[in-house]
Image (cartoon, rainbow, N blue to C red):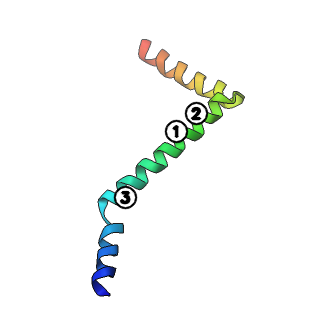
Amino acid sequence: MMEILSYLKARYTSEKAQGIVEYALILAFVVIVAVAIANGGDLQTKVKSVFTGISNSFGN
């Protein structure tokens, strides 16, 4: 029984599992932003203005 518990602890507390969770959170964030932009609305305008401001900063 202790072997199973130590195996599960090692499996779910490893850095690999943490990396998978981080990638899943990033993917979820990207999907939410993509859906919000695709649906239009105020968010699309704000995101465009931010990227335009950044590109103008690099241009100057």
Foreground pick, 4 / 40: 4
Which residue is identified by label 1? 30
* Quadrant occupied by the N terminus: bottom left
Say if residue 60 shows up in the picture: no
Which residue is identified by label 2? 34
Q: In what element is the residue under mark 2?
A: helix
Give the residue displayed 64% in from the left and 28% down from the top: 38
Residue type highlighted by circle 3: Gln
Which residue is identified by label 3? 18
For the residues labelled 2 and 1, the Cα–Cα distance comes to 6 Å
Give the residue displayed 69% in from the left and 30% down from the top: 39
Residue type highlighted by circle 2: Ala
Residue 8 percent location from the top left of the image: 34, 74
Marks 1 and 3 close (CB-CB < 8 Å): no
Please state if 19 lies on the left or on the right of 24 as rendered.
left
Marks 2 and 1 close (CB-CB < 8 Å): yes
Judge the density around disc 1: few (<14), some (14-19), many (≥20) Cα neighbours within 10 Å. Answer: few
Q: What numbered label is drawn on residue 7?
A: none
Q: Quadrant of residue 12?
A: bottom left
